[in-house]
Amino acid sequence: MGNPDAKYERTPHNAGFLCIDELCRRHGVELAGLGGVLRFKKTRISGRDVVLAKPMTYMNESGLAVQKLQRMFSFEPAEMLVIYDDIDLPLGSVRLRERGSAGTHKGMRSVIQHGGSQEFPRLRIGIENAAARPADIIRYVLTPLRGKPYILFQEGVARAAEAAQAILDSDIHSTMNIFNRRKNSLLLQEEEAKSSTRRKND
């Protein structure tokens, strides 16, 4: 999920779009437009028929695009993987879940409302900003990232693409066991630096 305008391209809220872009880049896929509702392409990855898609309806109406996809391809909710940003996860981290509620994410609320189910897998990319006050959250998620935060964000997008690929290569359960436990390299470097500093001070 994400927002279609170019000005949102590097924003935290476009994590899902960027992940699809990365999958398209890796597999030489180019999405085609469908009446302003969708950009999508049916292709084959790891021996499986796959539809890569980006809603063009803006985040809060993403469910309309999902509804359109369901009508076109007649898939069950459990066969869908929704990729999106999560403000409650550390920046650059990824988490997989098989099902669940929308939480505070309005895009997910739309998907569940129009899809009629919350029994579908979702891949979340962390965009947490501990410094942002609640009143600043909307501005933060719609503002392009720069510097180190953008590097962390890019790592999360790349790891999410790896996780989506791993699901196609094997299954969601084994992928969850791997990716829900891993941390990105910059977070590990920071933790190691803090540990080293603590050891020196002891």
Image: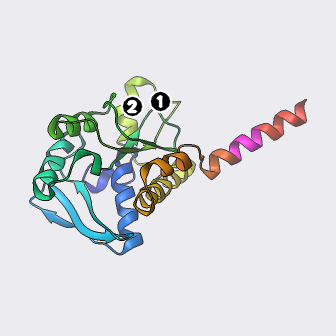
Query: Residue at 75% of width from left, 43% of height from top?
Result: 192
Which residue position is annotated with label 1?
Answer: 132
Give the residue at the far bottom of this rendering.
28
Instruction: Judge whether residue 1 can be spotted in this image.
Output: no
From this view, report whether residue 183 is shown above or below residue 20: above
Q: Is residue 156 left or right of residue 102?
A: right
* C-beta proximity under 8 Å, tags 1 and 2: yes
Spot occupied by residue 103 in the image (x, y as percentages of width and height) = 34, 28
Of pointers 1 and 2, the one earlier in the residue sequence: 1
Q: Is residue 91 magenta?
A: no
| Horizontal side, residue 103 vs residue 71: left or right | right
Q: Mark 1 and mark 2: span between their CA atoms?
A: 6 Å
Please report the bounds of the magenta region as a residue range. 189-194
Amino acid type assigned to the residue bearing label 2 in the image? Ile
Which element type, helix, strand or loop, lies under badge 1? loop
Q: Name the magenta segment's main secondary structure.
A: helix
Q: Residue at x 24, y 33 (%)?
A: 109
Q: Residue at x 39, y 69 (%)?
A: 46
Q: How is the image coloured?
A: rainbow
List the residue tagged with mark 2: 137
Q: Amino acid at mark 1?
A: Ala
**Residue 155 location (% of width, % of height):** 53, 54
Q: Quadrant of the C terminus?
A: top right
